[in-house]
Amino acid sequence: MSFTLHGIAVSSGIAIGYAHLISHTSLEVAHYVLPKQFLAEEIERFDHALMATRQEFASLRSNRPSYAAAEFDAFLELHQMILDDPMLSIGPREMVEREHCNAEWAIKVQTDALVAQFDEFEDAYLRERQADVKQVAERLLKQLSGQPGHQPTSARHDIETILVAHDLSPADLIQFKPQQYAAFLTDVGSATSHTAIVARSLNTPCVVGLHHARELIREDDLLILDGEQGVILVNPGKAVLAEYKLLQSEWELDRKKLKRLRSARANTLDGTAIELHANIEKPEDIAEVKENGATGIGLFRSEFLFLGRDELPGEEEQFEAYRTVAEGMKDQPVTIRTFDLGADKQIKGAERVSNNPALGLRAIRLCLAEPQLFRTQLRALLRATHYGNVKILIPMLSCVSELNQTLQFIAATKQGLDDEGIPYDRNVMIGGMIEIPAAALALNVFARKLDFLSIGTNDLIQYTLAIDRTDEDVAHLYDPLHPAVLQLLAHVIGTCNKLDVPVSVCGEMAGELAHTRLFLGMGLRQFSMFSAQVPTIKQRVLSTSLPEITSLTQKILRSDDPMKIRELLDKLNA
Ligand code: PEP
Ligand code: MG
């Protein structure tokens, strides 16, 4: 049966491939029937994984990291209880025996049933424990993945595959190798969630917020995913397929043509130089940065070094990662953000329960609450400054006391390195992210005490409009052109220019073509975005004359009528 689904387009490109469904838990789960003679072995696999997971909990308990919060023990106890629940410890075994299925599938089915039971609770706290059930199931599945069973060999390993999931966390996505999947689609999610950001940086088409795609699409259905329009065509007819194949090759040709701008300087028609930098998540990403002609790294989201792993990276591992980027970019600027963990980016095994994670212990707040973790990162970062043009960026600053505490931390870490005779750049620039309205409004103190500022529009919009950026139910209210947002942006850019403090925009807005001229008109001269978007934005810069856009930009900023703002923006971009 053919049908069409509409969602939120988050990463452009067209993909054509077969659906591969994964379960609610974030690990991939295949479903296959086993011949009778392999059943005993399969049950043994399950028993072994169960035992190994129990041992894993025991070792986590005895090696409880000192930075882990006090609730860590309670957390572990809860996870152990979930693991011992008969639905997870006995149910899958019985299911393999009864249905001759693989152990992974049995765990998935039992997990879904247990999650559904938690869903029925009236108490919000208990309802939220479904996340813990999924995490325990993930641990079990991970143990199984270390001991392969008798899987049927895939008949279509050479054909492109599109991953279909209810949800994917940023940590799930970052684990996929480049080009492992032709595209991703999920039921939940929004355009500025970190999952969407990672999809863009993997340069993989992606549509999210499809609501029931995971239920409606079957394994091996043929899919067309249009990452520009946010459309999924399931089992399309021949004519539609041919049309999309054509569109796909046109799209790829356009991208290739744009890459020819790689070494061109990003100057406006009147000769003003604009810096186009890239956002990265991992050191490996710098190949893409160069391929697309970005002239620096405006945001290295260092927290991705911490995600999806059981042990946290120590000082040496972090130092190597930062040094690799610093050296790889030669003398071009590399802005490394201290880790922004919390909310939708949680350290495995130390996940925190919070009613409002985006408003909770996240980013610099978490760093200041976990001094040892922060100190380790600062040492690694400062050491890396010796090997390139590294700058340090602090996320989510809201008040001056946080800023002072952070600067004291940095000073103390420098002192420690001095005492040990370890080299670092004594003049390393320290910058702050302006992504909380309070910081945007009380800007002067941040501008005075810091060497540069970078506007995180993803969070600035989230916190200004009170919209959870990960929640697809309110995604339609996420409006970068809301007059309040535009006022804040113009205020920050204008004030920084007046005070001669370098300012950039590194949120997703910086990579949206519709906003390039608006930002230029506000006075922005430095943008940072996902690498693949640099040539597109460069092309727009090259065709823009600053004197010609000033008066329209001012009109937009004076308007408080959303319709009018859109009308004027269309004119600006014509
Ligand atoms: C932002 O908030 O705009 C930003 C760049 O940081 P992140 O998306 O990682 O929160
Ligand atoms: Mg942010």
Image (cartoon, rainbow, N blue to C red):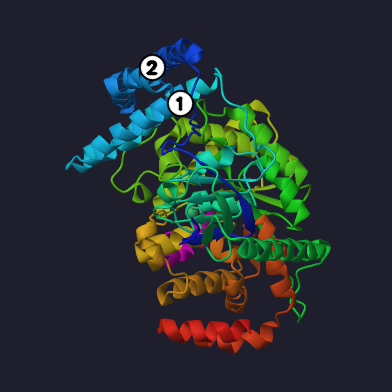
Could you tell me if residue 429 is visible in this image?
A: no
Name the secondary structure under disc 1: helix
| Closer-to-camera residue (349/223) | 223
Point out the image quarter for the C terminus. Answer: bottom right
Is residue 199 shown above or below 503?
above
Q: Is residue 490 magenta?
A: no
Q: Most extreme residue toward the left, as rendered?
A: 122
- Name the residue type under label 2: Glu
Q: Which of these two is toward me, 269 or 524?
A: 269
Q: Earlier in the sequence, mark 2 or mark 1?
A: 2
Left/right placement of residue 435 relative to residue 91 reads right
Residue at (53% x, 23% y) in the render: 145
Q: Of residues 207 and 337, which is closer to you in this image?
A: 207
| Real-space Cα separation, disc 2 to disc 1, in angstroms | 13 Å
Point out the stretch of residues depicted in magenta: 432-449
From the viewer's perspective, is 40 left or right of 321?
A: left
Find disc 2 in the rendering and name its residue: 97
The residue located at (39%, 57%) in the rendering is: 472
Numbered disc in front, either 2 or 1: 2
Q: Nearer the viewer, residue 87 or 463?
A: 87
Q: Relative to residue 30, is residue 212 depicted above or below?
A: below
Q: Which residue is mark 1?
A: 104
Report the amino acid beneath label 1: Glu
Residue for point 40% across, 83% down: 560
Numbered circles on residues, count: 2
